[in-house]
Amino acid sequence: MQEKLQVPTANFDLENEYDSYINAAFRSSKQGQAYLFIGTEYVVFDYSQAPSQAEVVKGPLPICNGFPFLKFTFFVDYELDAAFGSGENEAIFFFRDECAKINYSSNPSYDIKKITEMFPFLQYTLFESDIDAALESWKSNEAFLFKDDQCVCINYSSDNCGLVGTIRPIAEFFPILKDTFFDSGIQAGFMTNCYEVVLFKKDRWAWIKFGSPTRRFDTPLLHIGQMCPSLRNILPRQNSGLDIHGIHCGCVPNPPTGSRRRIYSDEEVEWLRVLCWLFFSP
């Protein structure tokens, strides 16, 4: 008689089901395209024509499909907090108190560290353990980090790394955002070209220019579906805490040594694989 499988007694830190919109984004090295991350999936977004003609040209797909070298890391098993492009075929991902510097070229690589190890100057700031959004700057080796209604500009080069100025409210950094939906927080964004960015927050978006504090929004503040009809059938996406597809494609939901995320026992991982088999097997 086959032994009945028993649910592990340890508590899982799975979150309740919730709807996800765009939680991270960065400009692709391919002209006129960007990666948008929605929960534990991503799409390739083509904005080369105009805001009203922007469209999804690939996806949604599991993150581990587009970035297979990140298998066996939690960056494909959980919803990213933020991301920004840091160079040709390079980007930095953030999840809780961890970050990963990745190279997604034909010779991919990654380096995972705690935020305060990769960016020591963020220690003892509100950005040391959690970042809401990130956005590459129009200046080389600089990026903006967002947390709640606060923002800071950083230089991440090896020679001049550090804070560029002080941590200030978003509306002080970018006066154009004052008294808008985004002055209290930003979920994701990417730069399309010098001074021009696309911002996301929940089901809203804006395509704006930061070149002049008096410049108004290039397009009205609209629902995402009005910006890109092909996103209308994708958003929102439903998540259920731990992503089962990650286990299905061989990813193990365990963070690297040193992370504050709880390590799953072998028994828990095996049970999650059984759940995956029950839900996804033909």
Image (spheres, grey):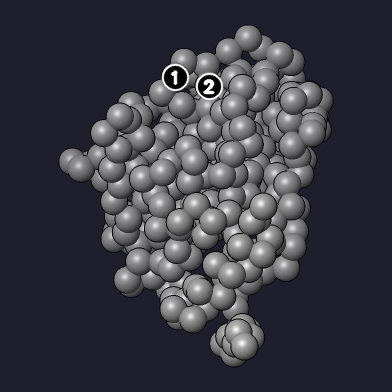
Q: SS at mark 2? A: strand
> How many numbered badges does the structure rendering display?
2
Residue 71 sits above or below residue 89 on the image:
below
Q: Nearer the viewer, residue 50 or 152?
A: 50
Residue sitting nearer the eye, 255 or 31 = 255
Task: Determine whether, in the image, residue 13 is placed left or right of residue 67.
Answer: right
Q: Is residue 163 left or right of residue 48?
A: left
Residue 123, by quadrant, is: bottom left
Q: Position of residue 200 (x, y in %)?
A: 66, 37
Are the residues flagged by discs 1 and 2 in contact, CB closer than 8 Å?
yes
Report crowding for label 1: few under 14, some 14 to 19, many 20 or more residues within 10 A (C-alpha). Answer: few
The reply to whether residue 208 is in sight is: no
Q: Which x, y percent locates residue 245?
A: 58, 54
| Residue sitting at x 49%, y 81% | 267
On the picture, is 12 further left or further right than 104?
right
Answer with the quarter of the image where residue 143 lies: top left
Q: CA distance from mark 1 to mark 2?
A: 6 Å
Residue that label 1 marks: 30
Label 2: how many Cα within 10 Å (few below 14, some 14–19, many 20+): many
User: Image height check: is 8 above or below 82?
Assistant: below
For image coordinates 62% across by 88% down, the residue present is 1
Amino acid type for the residue under numbered disc 1: Lys
Q: What secondary structure is found at the residue carrying circle 1? A: loop
Q: Nearer the viewer, residue 199 or 251?
A: 251
Looking at the rendered structure, which numbered label has been put on residue 136? none
Residue 225 vertical position relative to residue 194 in the rendered view, above or below: below
Relative image position of residue 2 (x, y in whole percent): 60, 84
Residue occupying image coordinates x 35% and y 66%: 256
Q: Is residue 272 visible?
A: yes
Write down the residue under mark 2.
Answer: 33
